[in-house]
Amino acid sequence: MKIKVAKSAGFCFGVNRAVTLVKNLLKDGKQVCTLGPIIHNPQTLAHLEALGAQVVEQPEQAPAGSTLVIRSHGVSRSVEDRIRRLPVVCADATCPFVEKIHRIVAQEGQTGSTILIAGNPAHPEVQGILGHCAGPAYVFSSAEELQNSIAMWNFPQKTAISVVAQTTFSVAEWRNCLQILKRVYTNVKIFDTICNATASRQSEAESLALACDAMVVLGGRQSSNTAKLYEVCSRHTRTIFAQSAAEISREDVAGVHHLGITAGASTPASIIKEVLVTMAEINEGVRSPETADSGDNF
Ligand code: F3S
C-alpha cells in the first residue's frame, strides 16, 4: 500500500493561532476559560483541559478575574457586548478571515443591503456573522435551499443584495449558488469569503481522492470543514472518516493499493502521524512512517 498525505492536512492558521493563544495563557499562569470548545478535536481538548483550561457555554459562567477566550469562529456583537460588561479579561482569537466577514456584513447592511449567507445556520461562525449584520439577513445551506427560498423571500425588484459565505463552505456548492444568484438577482454583490485554507484543502483532497482507491479523512465529528472533506472525497472514492488511528481497522484498508490521507483544520499533526504509524504497521513494516509521507507521489 502506498500512502500520500495531503500537504494541506491539519491545523489551519486560525485554529493554530487560537490553540497557541490558550496554551500561552495557561503557561503564563492565567485562569483560562474558552467560550465553547476551542477546537473540534477531543484529544487536543482533553490536553488543554488537563493543563487547566475550562470550557464555558455562556460568558457569564466564566469566573471573575479569569481570561475568557473567544474561539476562531468569532461571536455576535451582542455576545461581545456581554463579555465587555463582565469582570473578565477577554482574549479574542477570532480568525481574521472571519472578522473580515463581520466587517463586510456590517458595512453592507449599513448601506441598505440585504445580506445572504451561504452556510450552516446552526454553526457558531454563521451565528456570529448573523450577529454582525446591520439589517435583514438570511442563511441558506445549499444551492437547492437557495433556489427554494428565493420565492419565499420574494425581495422587491430593486433590493440590493450582498452575499457572503461561511469560511468553510463547500467551494463546489458555492459555485452552484452563485449561478442561481446571478440568474435571479441583477443587483447582487458577491463576496467570496471562503477561506483559502478551506479552498485549497478541498481541492487537494479532491485530486488525491481521484488518484486513490481509498481515502482517510481525519477530524472531529463536530467539525464542519472535516464533514465537507468527507463529502468531497466520497464523491470519488471509498472514504473512511476517523477521529484517530484507533478508529481505522485493518479491514478498512484491506486490498487498498493507493491510500490518501487528509485532515480537517482542527486535526493536530500528532494524530496524522499516529495514523501514518498505524498504516505502516498494517503494511507489516514494508513502509516506515518516515517514508509514507506527503512527499511521496506514489
Ligand atoms: Fe480561519 Fe480559515 Fe482556519 S477562516 S479558522 S484560517 S479555516
Image (spheres, helix red, strand yellow):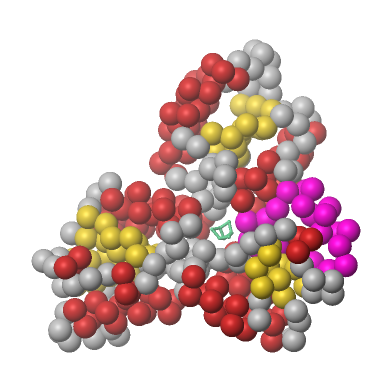
Rendered view: 87 above or below 101: below
Tell me if I can see residue 185 in this picture. Answer: yes
Apparent side of residue 89 relative to residue 196 in the rendered image (left or right): right
Among the 4 quarters of the image, the one containing residue 59: bottom right
Which quarter of the rendered picture does the C terminus lie within? bottom left
Task: Say above or below: 198 vs 250.
Answer: above
Stretch in magenta: 70-93
Above or below residue 158? Residue 110 is below
* Quarter holding ligand 1: bottom right
The spot of residue 105 in percent (x, y) is 71, 40
> Could you say where residue 71 lies in the image, as x and y percent from the top left?
65, 63
Q: Residue at x 88, y 67 (%)?
A: 87
Left or right of 286 in this view: 139: right
> Disc count in the image?
0
Outermost residue to the left:
255
| Quarter of the rendering occupied by the N terminus | bottom left
Nearest the viewer among 75 and 143 is: 75
Q: Residue at x 53, y 23 (%)?
A: 149
Can you tell which quarter of the image residue 138 is in?
top right
Decide if residue 32 is on the left or right side of residue 284: right
Q: Is residue 186 visible?
A: no
In the image, residue 92 lies in the stretch drawn in magenta: yes
Q: Position of residue 159 (x, y in %)?
A: 68, 19
Where is residue 104 shown, x and y percent of the image? 70, 42
Q: Residue furthest top?
A: 157
Tell whether position 85 is magenta. Answer: yes
Residue plotted at (16% across, 79% down):
283
Residue at image coords 65%, 68%:
55
